Image (cartoon, helix red, strand yellow):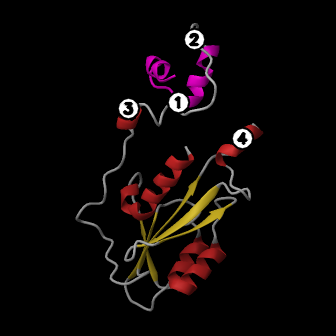
């Protein structure tokens, strides 16, 4: 299997297991073991982003003074019901929300059925964890479910958090949650 994966130019598992339909001489493989996680070339080629480095703007001096918030999803719904086992949670969840505290590095999460803005969950989280301090801030990407939602922005302002959006294609600026997303996504794959 690994040899054919390399001979065919390192295709994904899906294309490798269906290659026999398109390329004469390729054997038909059973969908058992993923090849991408075992191929040394694919493992070395997996590009990761650089960490923020010494010049970070994450400056929290107390718990929950600085937060990183982000959504991620495990997969996209498909007409093929057999694929659901690969990405669907026990109760139909397809995404999750993570909040990371910059001071303690503690992660808080919630699984979600959709990427709809979790207004009530955030309100409850902030009521229980927001400290009575100045200079509170929150990092998030510029996606629609959080940053571009006026209700979320108002909620964060209500709890005196300054919103610091990350730049486009700069997930290293929100590293505390992006690293956790990568760990979960690699486990799902």
First in sequence, mark 4 or 1: give its number.
Answer: 1
Q: Quadrant of the C terminus?
A: top right
Question: What residue is disc 3 on?
Answer: 40
Q: Nearer the viewer, residue 61 or 105?
A: 105
Marks 4/2: CA distance?
A: 26 Å
Mark 3 vs mark 2, foreground winner is 3
182 up-or-down from 161: above or below: above
Do the residues bearing badges 3 and 2 touch, measured as CB atoms within 8 Å? no
Q: Secondary structure at mark 3?
A: helix
Marks 4/1: CA distance?
A: 18 Å
Marks 1/3: CA distance?
A: 14 Å
Q: Quadrant of residue 114?
A: bottom right
Lateral position of residue 95 relative to residue 157, left or right: right
Main secondary structure type of the part rendered in magenta: helix
Do the residues bearing badges 1 and 3 touch, measured as CB atoms within 8 Å? no
Q: Which stretch appears magenta?
A: 1-21
First in sequence, mark 3 or 2: give its number.
Answer: 2
187 up-or-down from 22: above or below: below
Density class for disc 4 (Cα within 10 Å; few <14, some 14-19, many ≥20) is few
| Furthest residue toward bottom | 132
Q: Quadrant of residue 152?
A: bottom right
Mark 4 vs mark 2, foreground winner is 2
Question: What residue is disc 2 on?
Answer: 23
Question: What residue is disc 1 on?
Answer: 12
Residue 150 in sight in this render: yes
Density class for disc 3 (Cα within 10 Å; few <14, some 14-19, many ≥20) is few
Question: What residue is disc 4 on?
Answer: 78
């Amino acid at each position: 299997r690994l040899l054919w994966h390399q001979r065919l130019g390192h295709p994904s598992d899906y294309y490798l297991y269906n290659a026999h339909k398109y390329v004469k001489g390729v054997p038909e493989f059973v969908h058992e073991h993923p090849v991408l996680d075992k191929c040394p070339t694919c493992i070395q080629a997996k590009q990761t982003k650089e960490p923020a480095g010494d010049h970070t703007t994450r400056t929290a001096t107390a718990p929950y003074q600085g937060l990183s918030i982000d959504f991620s999803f495990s997969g996209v719904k498909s007409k093929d019901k057999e694929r659901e086992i690969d990405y669907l949670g026990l109760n139909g969840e397809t995404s999750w929300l993570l909040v990371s505290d910059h001071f303690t590095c503690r992660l808080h999460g919630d699984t979600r059925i959709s990427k709809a803005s979790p207004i009530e969950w955030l309100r409850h989280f902030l009521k229980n964890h927001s400290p009575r301090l100045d200079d509170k801030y929150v990092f998030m990407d510029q996606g629609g479910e959080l940053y571009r939602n006026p209700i979320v922005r108002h909620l964060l302002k209500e709890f005196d958090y300054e919103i610091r959006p990350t730049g486009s294609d700069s997930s290293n600026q929100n590293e505390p949650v992006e690293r956790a997303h990568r760990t979960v996504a690699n486990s799902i794959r």
